[in-house]
Image (cartoon, rainbow, N blue to C red):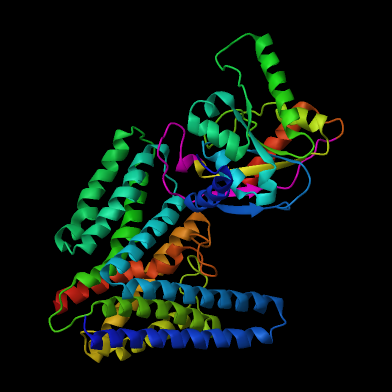
Amino acid sequence: MFDSHIISRMIPLLTRLILGANARWYCPQETAVQRVYFANHTSHLDTLLLWSLLPPQVRSLTRPVAAKEYWNATRLRRFIAQKVFNAVLIERPNHDGGEESSRVALASRAFSIILEAIGETHSLIIFPEGTRGNSVTMRPFKSGLYHLACKKPGLEMIPVYLENLNRILPKGELLPIPLLSSVTFGSPLFLGEHETKKSFLERARRAIEELSV
Amino acid sequence: MNIAVDAQLAWMFSGVVGLLIAASIIGFLLGRNVTDDAKRVVIDNLNARTWAWWVMCAIFAVAIFSGTIGSVILFALMSFLALREFITLTPTKHGDHRTLFWVFFVVIPLHYYLVAIRWYGLFSILIPVYVFLFVPLRSALAGETANFLERTAKIQWGLMVCVYCISHAPALLMLDIPGYSGNAKLLFFLVLVVQLSDVLQYVFGKTLGRRKIAPLISPNKTWEGFLGGVVCSSLIGAGLWWATPFTPFQAGGMALAINLMGFSGGLCMSAIKRDRGVKDFGTMIEGHGGIMDRIDSISFAAPIFFHLTRFYFT
């Protein structure tokens, strides 16, 4: 029905126009290196905008990691996730409980899906908070970012700060308002030798916070 | 519209095109011999500005020659983009989300529709009466009380300067002036005088500027730039009397009022930018900043020029 090729070219253009996006880069835009773009998460538009601002070559190899239950919910979302984004869909643990052991199993399954998806060519977009937060403070980061850095030490971890999207389309609203957004791509982070999980995740979080000022 | 009227408009445009050609040549000549890096930056910015002027003039020409509809659509778009920059810069809360949705997608089109159908009565009170009461009500219904007064004031002021004031420029087209037709020239007169005054203030400021007028608000505004720009552009305004319903003396007085208001607009918008810690409202127009940076002076000048003309000449 749709030509997904044309759509994947039109969507970035329209997105940048409608969201009045202004991008700042503190790292090279074009790159042959595999990357993980990790960003703060406040709006449903986050994935769309970040993905749209990547240069076309990089974009075609970059896959957003997203929640399965959201992106599989309707036909349109499924189409966008599969044909446009080529998203990596993972199951999120239930927040209000569930057995600890089942949550661990879920997380490790999600991690192996992500590892498989990235392969030797792809890059990823990840929201390490796991879910949309409010604009003021970021939630604590999930540990996936750290495990990726351990498994694939060559990956460039790029912190990305998304600004104003929570005002354009806040949590719980259906219709967006036309404000200007901005996206800042920071310089790459690497896991230090003997760096602990806690300190790496904290450093990653601070890297995004530093881009916000 | 008769042919004589169009010819006058065409003369005004030719004048502007002549100025732009001169500015482009001067920019090119200045750029050739520059070796110093700091000067290079100034000259590059100057040339970017000139180039942006070409584009803005082309858009304005298309709009104004396509009649009332073209002008109304152009100014409606400018209001929309200016308000977008304004609200982006002034923090609002989640409780204002739906209010803002109404403002952007209902109030702006409705207000400019009133300009297009020349309904002066409702045009002049829609925003200051109905919308100014609706805005706090809608935000109150959303139930968020923190900084309520401040948030409401911000949205109201954004509407005032970006929509209500700006719309008085195309509203000139709805005035019935006895013995005068082709109000597009009046709109052109306003925009030309106010923008020339901005440009001349920049030129005089850069070349002769010493004494700062308001160093805490805008370091680029100097007494020399202000006086040189305002006097020159008022004289040019007087020289354009043949395209207006005014005598040369009246045209000069109108141009002076436009320029003083334009300066005030620029100063107030600079105060907002300073308070928010930014240099420009946006990045849309290369060399100039955002839309709001370009039309801040029109915003203050348009309603005063509109009402002076309406009071004394209709």
Where is residue B220? Give x, y as percent.
Answer: 51, 73
Residue A106 seen in this snapshot: yes
Residue A213 to residue A192: above or below? below
The one of B183 and A132 positioned closer to us in this rendering: B183
Horizontal side of A11 relative to B103 (left or right) equals right
Magenta-colored segment: predominant secondary structure: loop
Where is residue B89? Give x, y as percent.
Answer: 46, 52
Looking at this rendering, what residue extends furthest in the front direction?
A1
Quadrant where the image shows the C terminus of chain B: bottom left
Residue B177 found in image quarter: bottom left
What residue is shown at x 28% (from left), y 66% (from top)? B69
What residue is shown at x 67% (from left), y 45% (from top)? A60
The one of B165 and A91 positioned closer to us in this rendering: A91
What residue is shown at x 58% (from left), y 84% (from top)? B27
Q: How many marks?
A: 0
Looking at this rendering, what residue extends furthest in the right direction?
A193
Residue B194 to residue A92: above or below? below
Horizontal side of B131 relative to B56 (left or right) equals left
Q: Is residue B54 magenta?
A: no
Residue A133 seen in this snapshot: no
> Which span of residues is magenta-colored?
A166-192
Quadrant where the image shows the N terminus of chain B: bottom left
Q: Is residue A191 magenta?
A: yes
Residue A191 to residue A188: above or below? above
What residue is shown at x 35% (from left), y 50% (from top)? B104
The one of B285 and B246 positioned closer to us in this rendering: B285
Horizontal side of A105 relative to B172 (left or right) equals right
Where is residue A154? Give x, y as percent.
Answer: 83, 39
Where is residue B227? Give x, y as percent.
Answer: 41, 83
The one of A5 and B5 positioned closer to us in this rendering: A5
